[in-house]
């Protein structure tokens, strides 16, 4: 499945954008190199809507900024219509999650701004801005100020500002994700209509999203970007006819298929998990224990209701009113701890997961502790250090520093917070936040058992 995107060297004129072996790393404050994107190969073809789907932090925005010429790859090359990208790309417009509109300018003036930079004469500016406002369904609001508009209308102004330049290519970074569900859906359909009826001269659209249904609704082709580092993991052509029906079997199948790919672990990540005991600098999904227990209980309930142990991930997402981004860290956590397993877009409780759900509050803790020790090397390491030391105490900074060898400073803090939450729940160690000190003051199961005999 991986690396299907090799462009094979030759650039065709029909490609609006080509990325070849693109790599991007950033320098962390501690001087370490953080690799964000590694060997990304992709192309945006003439006439297509391409959706780039990936989880938060996979490097989607980073890739988009490089395509737009706003930042440079660390290695590899980027071509726009066959020419190297070495600065802002002409004929390109970007749409973001939200727009910084100038509050002291009217809607019309905000839209005209896009043309001022292009040195379009004032009369033509006005006429084109009015046409763009009309196109995007904002006529009547030309003289309104941003504060008078709803979030959805402000986002429309942003779209008008992008479309007024008659862009050859539109790069959109989660343009619908800050909107309420109904507004977002209306704007998706409006954009698809403009595109299908060729009311805009745009030859290609690249849409970044972490919403699987949005991708299946809009895309001619979907690229799935994996994380740590980001790479194109799969390419999926979407052959369903437009307009698409979210409830049709073809649509549902496609959504399930993509869930399956996004939740399967690439071989490299499996290796890291198996090397486990030596790797403490592994990211941990940032979820509190109570949410994790909530998911296990929900899985159990769905299993009882349906009579089948395998629950499809879209079903559990719907059921718990979760977005993909909320669900992924949770399933990663229960899988890491061995309480559930994922296969082909389905999730299933393991025997241990069922035991956990059945157990009462006190029985759950030692069970959780055993799985934490086995599945999370960092927790095992903290416990081992505390056991070794005479006073059974160790500063948190010590582990944070170790983590920073492998992770960014922010990430190290987050990972440590998670392992504190999980370890406290398991009564594997205590942590004093004021002093930043781990200790065994809160006796774990070993001591409790020891004093009982
Ligand atoms: N200028 C920078 N310096 C250091 N790290 C950066 C920089 N820009 C981005 N990153 C890091 O690169 C990673 C990818 O970021 P990016 O914003 O591209 O992800 P994304 O896929 O767009 O995520 P989201 O879905 O949350 O928008 C993140 O870990 C981020 O912290
Ligand atoms: Mg982003």
Image (cartoon, rainbow, N blue to C red):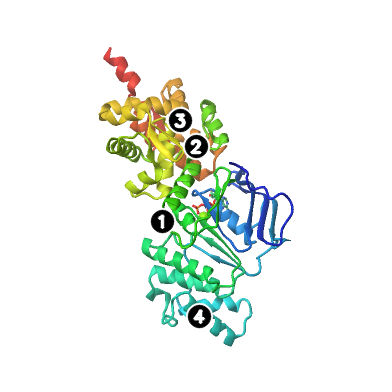
- For disc 2, the neighbor class at 10 Å (few under 14, some 14 to 19, many from 20) is many
C-beta proximity under 8 Å, tags 1 and 4: no
Mark 4 sits on what residue? 109
The answer as to whether callout 2 falls within 8 Å of ligand 1 is no
The Cα–Cα distance between marks 3 and 4, rounded to whole angstroms, is: 55 Å
The Cα–Cα distance between marks 3 and 1, rounded to whole angstroms, is: 39 Å
Answer with left or right where residue 80 lies relative to residue 249: right
C-beta proximity under 8 Å, tags 1 and 2: no
Q: Position of residue 252 (x, y in %)?
A: 42, 50
Q: Residue at x 52, y 51 (%)?
A: 53
Q: Position of residue 144 (x, y in %)?
A: 41, 80
Residue 400: mark in rendering: 2
Mark 3 sits on what residue? 376
Q: Earlier in the sequence, mark 2 or mark 4?
A: 4
Q: Quadrant of the N terminus?
A: top right
The Cα–Cα distance between marks 1 and 4, rounded to whole angstroms, is: 38 Å
The Cα–Cα distance between marks 1 and 2, rounded to whole angstroms, is: 45 Å
Q: Residue furthest left?
A: 360
The secondary element bearing badge 2 is classed as helix
**Is 284 situated above or below 245?**
above
């Amino acid at each position: 499945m991986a690396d299907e995107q090799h462009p094979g060297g030759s650039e065709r004129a029909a490609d609006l954008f080509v990325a070849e072996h693109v790599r991007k790393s950033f320098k962390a404050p501690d001087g370490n190199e953080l690799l964000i994107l590694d060997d990304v190969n992709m192309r945006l073809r003439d006439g297509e809507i391409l959706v780039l789907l990936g989880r938060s932090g996979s490097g989607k925005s980073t890739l988009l900024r490089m395509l737009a010429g706003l930042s440079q790859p660390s290695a590899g090359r980027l071509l726009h219509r066959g020419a190297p990208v070495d600065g802002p790309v002409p004929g390109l417009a970007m749409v973001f999650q939200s727009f910084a509109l100038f509050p002291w300018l009217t809607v019309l003036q905000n839209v005209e701004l896009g043309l001022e930079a292009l040195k379009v004469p004032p009369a033509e500016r006005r006429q084109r801005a009015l046409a763009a406002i009309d196109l995007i369904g904002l006529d009547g609001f030309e003289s309104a100020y941003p504060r008078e508009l709803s979030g959805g209308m402000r986002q429309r102004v942003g779209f008008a500002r992008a479309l007024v330049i008659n862009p050859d290519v539109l790069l959109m970074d989660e343009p619908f994700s800050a909107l309420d569900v109904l507004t977002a859906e209306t704007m998706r359909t409006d954009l698809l209509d403009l595109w299908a009826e060729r009311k805009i001269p745009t030859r290609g659209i690249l849409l970044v999203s972490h919403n699987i249904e949005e991708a299946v609704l809009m895309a001619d082709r979907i690229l799935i970007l994996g994380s740590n580092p980001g790479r194109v993991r799969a390419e999926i052509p979407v052959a369903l006819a437009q307009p698409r029906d979210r409830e049709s079997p073809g649509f549902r199948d496609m959504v399930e298929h993509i869930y399956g790919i996004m939740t399967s672990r690439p071989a490299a990540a499996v290796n890291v998990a198996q090397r486990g005991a030596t790797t403490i600098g592994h990211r941990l999904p940032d979820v509190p224990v109570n949410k994790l227990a909530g998911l296990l209980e929900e899985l159990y309930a769905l299993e009882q209701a349906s009579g089948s142990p395998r629950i499809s991930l879209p079903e559990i997402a719907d059921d718990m009113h979760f977005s993909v981004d909320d669900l992924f860290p949770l399933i990663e956590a229960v899988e890491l701890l061995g309480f559930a397993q994922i296969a082909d877009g389905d999730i299933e409780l393991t025997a241990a997961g069922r035991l956990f759900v059945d157990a009462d509050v006190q029985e759950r803790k030692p069970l959780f502790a055993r799985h934490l020790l086995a599945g999370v090397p960092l927790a095992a390491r903290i416990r081992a250090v505390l056991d070794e030391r005479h006073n059974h105490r160790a500063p948190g900074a010590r582990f944070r520093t170790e983590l920073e060898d492998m992770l960014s400073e922010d990430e190290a803090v987050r990972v440590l917070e998670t392992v504190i939450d999980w370890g406290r729940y398991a009564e594997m160690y205590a942590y004093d936040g004021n002093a930043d000190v781990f200790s065994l003051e809160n006796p774990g199961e070993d001591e409790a058992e020891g004093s009982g005999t």
